[in-house]
Amino acid sequence: MSGKVATHESATLAAPSIVPDLNAVVHDADALLALMSQESLRVVAELADGLIRSAHEAGAVEIEAAAKDIRRLASGNGLVALAGAMRALTSAISHTESLLAA
C-alpha cells in the first residue's frame, strides 16, 4: 500500500473498462482504503461498487469479496463499523501484491 493520501476528487480509478489488470485493481483498492476515513458512506459504497466490478473482471477474488463487504456495510442504515472490512481489504491487497511479485 502506498503512503500517499488520496481525496475523492483526485482518486481516479486506474482500471480500464475492458478487463483491468491486477496492478490497476490493487491501485483502486488502495485508493478506496485511503478514502474510507475521509468520505461519506454513500461515496465509499459507490467506490466499492466500482472496485467490485474491476476486481471481478481481473479475477481478484479476495479484493472483490472484501469490496462487497465494504459496500454492504457502507450501504446499510445506522451505525457502521468499517474497521474489520478495512483490515480484510488490506489483507487482500497484500496477498494480491505478493502474487504479482512472484
Image (spheres, helix red, strand yellow):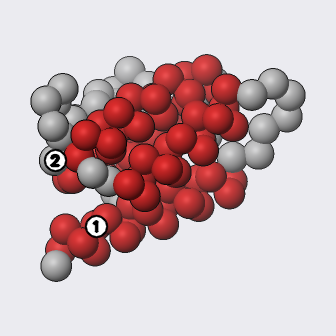
Asked if residue 22 lies left or right of residue 6, the reply is left
**Residue 30 spot, x, y in % from top left:** 39, 49
Q: Which mark is residue 97?
A: 1
Of badges 2 and 1, nearer the viewer stands: 2
Residue at the location (39% across, 29% down)?
A: 50
Above or below for 51 versus 39? below
- Asked if residue 6 can be seen in this view, the reply is no
**Residue 9 spot, x, y in % from top left:** 38, 21
Which quarter shows the C terminus?
bottom left
Q: Which residue is mark 2?
A: 21
- Find the distance from the CA under tag 2 to the CA under tag 1: 12 Å
Viewer-proximal residue, 29 or 56? 56
All told, the count of numbered labels is 2
Asked if residue 20 lies left or right of residue 91, the reply is left
- Asked if residue 49 can be seen in this view, the reply is yes
Asked if residue 20 lies left or right of residue 9, the reply is left
Residue 37, located in which quarter of the rendered image?
A: top right
Amino acid beneath label 1 = Glu
Q: Are marks 2 and 1 in contact (CB under 8 Å)?
A: no
Amino acid beneath label 2 = Asp
Q: Residue furthest toward the bottom?
A: 102
